[in-house]
Image (cartoon, rainbow, N blue to C red):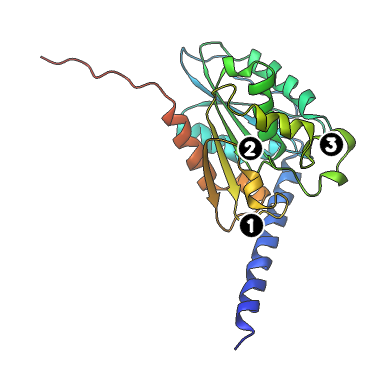
Amino acid sequence: MAFLPDLGRGALLGRLWGMETLSTLRQAVLWPRDLSPVVPEACADGDDVVVLIHGFFASAGAFRPMRVRIERETGAHVASFTHAPGQSVRTIARKLARVVDRIPATSRVHLVGHSLGGIVARWYVQELGGHARVTQTISMASPFGGAPLAHKLPYFIGRDLRAGSATLVRLRTGANAERVPHTSIIAGEDHLVVPRESGAFQHGEVFVLAGRSHNSLLFDREVVRIVATQVAAHRPVTPLAKTG
């Protein structure tokens, strides 16, 4: 019966491979959607706006299912934009800045980034003055400690995502310079961001979701629940009305 543990491990790996393959195919189907920036303009005073930032070789369309759930479960508006594959963290962060500039100044802005998108969110906050506009940042499967496959990516983004790169070191050393809260969401079976600890930013809460893979986080209801909880946690407390 000694073969049973190996058989169980094989079944788990097969399930994870299927999950990641399906998630990647869903991204491919959604690729043509939301190629132009989606920015809510009719926001009331103090509304929440969640800005979604996708990862490498994807588009904002990958967030379509998540966007619907976030809007339904939080009541927040959602903004997104698409960036071309291979661009540097700095270049994408400047595009993010232009999107945030279009959001009413009275809104609470929450940045939610998948993979590369989480790195971009923190760069905007720490290096481009985004701390003045952003309430919090949330990352999903973001390689803050570097990505082992970065050397296979196009020059600019591959350089930025290598372990020990100037970009990642600068984010780490300046993590506490601008006090914008951060939440790291890690896929427990992520084979692109390894070791698992490299998916956690230098400060803030960390959630490890067992049995999830890198891209499956995009379509995971638990991720939406965490995002919804964090958005609600940063809303101002409404004073109780006086009675009598």
Residue that numbered label 1 is attached to:
189
Q: Earlier in the sequence, mark 2 or mark 3?
A: 2
Residue 125 sits above or below residue 62 on the image = above
Which percent across, then down, holds residue 196? 64, 51
Disc 1 on helix, strand or loop? loop
Q: Is residue 110 above or below residue 55?
A: above
> With 156 as the anchor, is 83 left or right in this view?
left
Question: Which label is found at residue 203?
Answer: none
The picture places residue 42, in percent across and down from the top left corner, at 54, 14
* Badge number at residue 64: 2
Q: Quadrant of the C terminus?
A: top left
Report how far apart the C-alphas of labels 1 and 2 lie in the structure.
Answer: 23 Å
Q: Earlier in the sequence, mark 1 or mark 2?
A: 2
Q: Given the image, on which type of amino acid does mark 2 rest?
A: Arg
The numbered mark, 1 or 3, whose residue comes first in the sequence reads: 3
Q: What kind of residue is marked 1?
A: Glu
Q: Nearer the viewer, mark 1 or mark 3?
A: 3
Secondary structure of residue under mark 2: helix
Q: Secondary structure at mark 3?
A: helix
Q: How many marks?
A: 3
Q: Which mark is residue 159?
A: 3
Residue type, mark 3 in image: Arg
* Mark in the foreground, 2 or 3: 3
For the residues labelled 2 and 3, say whether their Cβ atoms are less than 8 Å apart: no
